Image: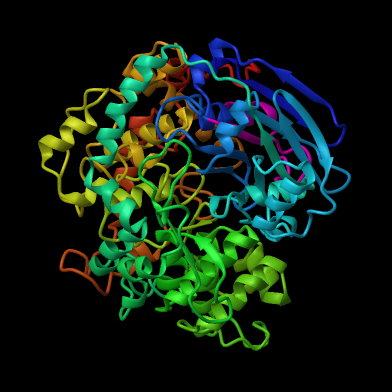
Amino acid sequence: MALDRKIAYINLTTGDIEVKPIPMEVRKKFLGGRGLDAYLLYNHTKQGCDPLGPDNALIISGGILCATLASATARTHVMAKSPLTGLLGSCNMGGFFAPEMAWAGFHHLVIKGKAEKPSYIYINNGKIEIRDAANIWGKTVTDSQWAIHDDLNDKEVKSLVIGPAGENLVAYANVMTGVKNAGGRSGMGAVMGSKNLKAVACRGTMDVKITHPVEALEYNKKFIEQITGAKVSQTQGTLGTPFIWGATNSWGGVRTENFRYNQLEYADDIEPERIDDIATETMGPYHMAGCFGCQVHCRAQYKIPSGKYKGKYDEGPEYTSQGAFGGEVGCTSAETVLAGNHLVDQFGMDNLETGSMIAWAMECFEEGLLTKEQTDGIDLRFGNDEAVLEMIERICYRKGWLGDVLAKGGIPASKDVGKNSFDYLIQVKGMANLHSDERATPALALNIATGSRGSDHLRSRPAIDLYHLPEEVLRRIYSTPIPYDGPLSSEHTEYIGKPWQVFWQENCYMAVDSLGICKYHTTFLGATLPNFENWPTVLYLNTGIEMTPEEIWEVARRNNMLERMFNLREGLTRNDPEKGDVLNHRYHDEPAKRGAIDVIGRYIIKEKFDVMVDEFYEHKGLDKNGIPKKSTLKELGLENEPSHLV
């Protein structure tokens, strides 16, 4: 059955491997996936450990529902202390790896130590071995996966791999699976590289027994109808996530030229319809691909139509690549967006961080903080397509002074560049912002400021705040499963009520990350998609675990608090510009210059923002400094951590 999946502790230094069951007590307290990973990280790393040292625990998991009959349960999660931020490192990706790992017998891996030479882990039906990766080291993401197929003589093997960026310890290197499924934030690829770990490969044919299979299938049909019937899902299935760009750029919600503007002009070539015209490669009868168990199929397949990389195959691009290699760097060419997307996929680099670092360097260059000597003669001005693609490669291989500096991440880079370059760095807790501009949306600004792994659109973002939903609809969403009778507003420029929305979304996203469900199948972009009231039934029919919506809410709160506890242990302080719940000063000091009438002139009012943070802390059970109250820890059963239950 699903609950038979094990946890493995792997020491790359000694070669020791220990396999243990996951006790029911632990399942009911943390469920699995990201939530149980947070518990494992807090319990298996020491305060102040070097993120790139052997004592940093690298944790890989699938949610408790992965490989079951529940829809869209393909999410793989990776967690460790981040080399980019020095705080919580965490990334989540789709594809086919997590189900394969479950079929191979495991839900969680805890990896410590450092291999003496390049290695990879192979898991096959309950057995684990550490294998030589000498002939794979140095290869790109897709070539690495093909090489593992050849090494094992099995094309059905699914692998998590790092590319050259991870090997070179780029602070925001990805963990990748498939062509473009990216565990992209916080540098988990660099942690793998520091351990001489090129990949984790899985092949499984072990049964996953479903508790009530007939009923689970019937209930999942309702799930599928609910998901595919939503207009947002239908749009994603046609245009992929680039559809978001079409709305947000025209409205004035994307940061452009680092943070100078909030709308990219003359950008028809990277609009979603244009990308859709180019993305005509097919696998079977469709040009849109999907992950295991998903009916939405939100990613396109394409070959770059022209230029230096003409004919190269890839998947996407995501909304994030339009921002990273379009808006942020001031480029309006589809070729640049597609080529940039392809390079970071092959090198194994976070597209958000890469685009943001290049955009920051461009503004520094135009402001006279960087010289041509420091850029090795590259004219690093906004809109220089060739410079963008050149810098992606330089960062990956740490070529030249600037390539090496940018590879360190934003805060260390700003210290190397010096002067007032830190002021231009659009980051929270050391992690670059998504390319969105939140000056007109206080709720989204609060979300990025308080995200557990740094600036984040996937930890607590109330994206539906932009839909102007009637208050009664908001009340129905945000009062389930816990009653809420406080203020709510349909106006996205308002401050009141937004802290509860962010708190609610934080728990919603933790729940799906612990279950193993894709966020696109809950209240992220679609207000009518499944939620707390649906998950107990899905959980029970597939695994036999009986929980109420309120109990799943409490699990999510507990897991989020563990992430907060880890960050506080590693130096998080409320108002610290490098490790705090604060925004770059430009959010408060520079009004938005472009866009719709409800955007132009907007900025985040500092005094009101501080009140929002206070309210958010109160909802979480923190004091004014962001530290958990003793009563909160006792309520959540966390007063004795680390408890070493597993």
The number of numbered discs placed on residues in the rendered structure image is: 0
Residue depicted at 26% across the width and 43% down the height: 526
Say above or below: 289 vs 387: above
**Left or right: residue 384 compared with residue 17:** left
* Residue shown at the point (50%, 80%) measured from the top left: 306
Q: Position of residue 587 (x, y in %)?
A: 35, 62
Colouring mode (rainbow / by chain / secondary structure / one colour): rainbow
Residue depicted at x 25% and y 60%: 440
| Residue toward you, 645 or 628 | 645
Q: Where does the C terminus fall, quadrant-wise?
A: top right
Q: Quadrant of residue 70?
A: top left
Query: Is-magenta flag for residue 151?
Result: no
Nearer to us in this view, 36 or 592 = 36
Give the image quarter of residue 617: top left
Q: Position of residue 201 (x, y in %)?
A: 70, 39
Part of the protein shown in magenta: 39-62
Q: Work out whether 117 lies above or below 507.
A: below
Observer-nearest residue: 73 or 612? 73
Q: Position of residue 2 (x, y in %)?
A: 53, 18
Task: Give residue 631's quadrant in the image.
Answer: top left
Relative horizontal placement of residue 402, taking residue 66 as reference (left or right): right
Whether residue 240 is visible to the viewer of this picture, yes or no, is: yes
- Say whether residue 42 is visible: no
> Residue 334: x percent and y percent?
42, 75
